[in-house]
Image: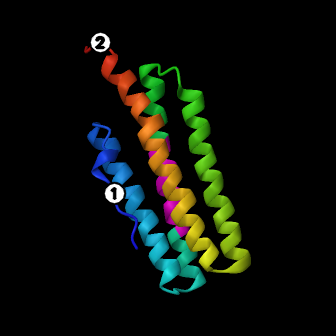
Amino acid sequence: MTIAWDPTLVVGIPEIDEQHQELFRRLDALLESIRGGRSRDEVAHTLAFLREYARSHFAAEEALMAARGYPGLADHRAEHEAFAAELVTLDAERQRDGATASLIIRVNTQLTGWLRSHIYRTDRALVTFLQALPRS
């Protein structure tokens, strides 16, 4: 089972949509590394790459929110921080226990579920705000 991008996740801002699609690809690559029994180093590298990509994506979203005066920036940022913290927790689990079935399940359910929920709810609220702004 792969983690696939779902077209219903499109928010309508091409740069953000592309980044969201890439996040799904990175999550899928992480799952494949774990499931494929790849070395601890390769799983660690994939997880680190996902963490860095998420960080840069979140920074881009937050910069857009700050530039446009989005009133929900603090709450949105807190959600991003929760996702980043979950990645750190998963990496600690990987270091402690290795690439276990439990790790696969947590990546698949928690990270993917969080990402879908965040895009559907939180990112769409941002897009609604941005679309309501007067065009300059």
Task: For marks 1 and 2, give the CA distance.
Answer: 31 Å
Q: Earlier in the sequence, mark 1 or mark 2?
A: 1
The magenta region covers 47-58
- Measured as percent of width and height from the top left, residue 125 is found at 43, 29
Give me the residue at 27% from left, 37% from top.
12
Any mark on residue 118, and which? none
The C terminus: image quadrant: top left
Query: In the rendered image, which quarter is residue 90 located in?
Result: bottom right
* Residue 72 located within the stretch drawn in magenta: no
Any mark on residue 5, and which? 1
- Measured as percent of width and height from the top left, residue 10 is found at 30, 43
- Measured as percent of width and height from the top left, residue 35 is found at 50, 81
Evaluate if marks 1 and 2 touch, with contact meaning CB atoms under 8 Å apart. no
97 to the left or right of 76: right
Give me the residue at 34% from left, 54% from top.
21
Residue 29 versus residue 68 in the image, above or below: below
Q: Amino acid at mark 2?
A: Pro
Main SS, magenta region, reads: helix
Mark 2 = which residue? 134
Label 2: few (<14), some (14–19) or many (≥20) C-alpha neighbours in 10 Å: few
User: For this rendering, which residue is in front, 108 or 72?
Assistant: 108
Give me the residue at 57% from left, 58% from top.
110
Q: Is residue 83 visible?
A: yes
Q: Considering the numbered disc 1 on the image, is that residue within a helix, a strand or a loop?
A: loop
Q: Amino acid at mark 1?
A: Trp
